[in-house]
Amino acid sequence: MSDLMLKTAVASKVRVNGWKNTTVEAMRRRTGDRGQTAVEYLGIIAVVVAIVLAITGTSIGSTILQKITGLIGKVGN
């Protein structure tokens, strides 16, 4: 085997092993986040529900609907 081929083979192996080690470390770091996403999603859903209830419980919802309908009517003309 020539020196060039040997150097290329060694460099390729080093790069692949480096990529593999980096990927394994990244996957290990991600395992510590278990359970947080469910709580975060529930928090977001609670905020969205509160906003929807605030809009439907007041006259803000009908005002927003009238403004959007008026703007769509202007675009159509």
Image (spheres, grey):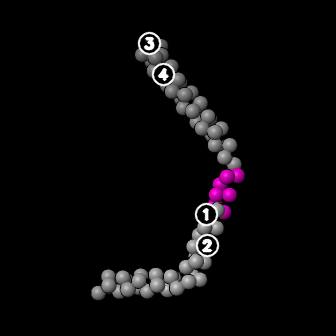
Mark seen at residue 68: none
Which x, y percent locates residue 59? Answer: 52, 85
What's the residue type where badge 1 is placed?
A: Ile
Circle 4 or circle 1, nearest the eye: 1
Q: Nearer the viewer, residue 75 or 44?
A: 44
Mark seen at residue 3: 3
Question: Within 10 Å of the Cα at label 2, are there few (<14), some (14-19), or many (20+) other Cα atoms?
Answer: few
Q: Which residue is mark 4?
A: 11
Q: Quick one: SS at disc 3?
A: helix
70 relative to 19 in the view: left or right: left
**Residue at point 47%, 13% (across, down):** 1
Q: CA distance from mark 3 to mark 4?
A: 12 Å
Which x, y percent locates residue 11? Answer: 48, 22
Q: Quadrant of residue 30?
A: top right
Q: Nearer the viewer, residue 12 or 64?
A: 64
Does label 2 or label 4 sit earlier along the sequence?
4
Q: Quick one: SS at disc 4?
A: helix
What's the residue type where badge 3 is placed?
A: Asp
Circle 3 or circle 1, nearest the eye: 1
Q: Is residue 33 above or below residue 9?
A: below
Q: Which residue is mark 2?
A: 50
What's the residue type where badge 4 is placed?
A: Ala
Q: Which residues are magenta?
A: 35-42
Residue 66: in magenta span = no
Q: CA distance from mark 2 to mark 4?
A: 57 Å
**Residue at point 36%, 82% (across, down):** 71
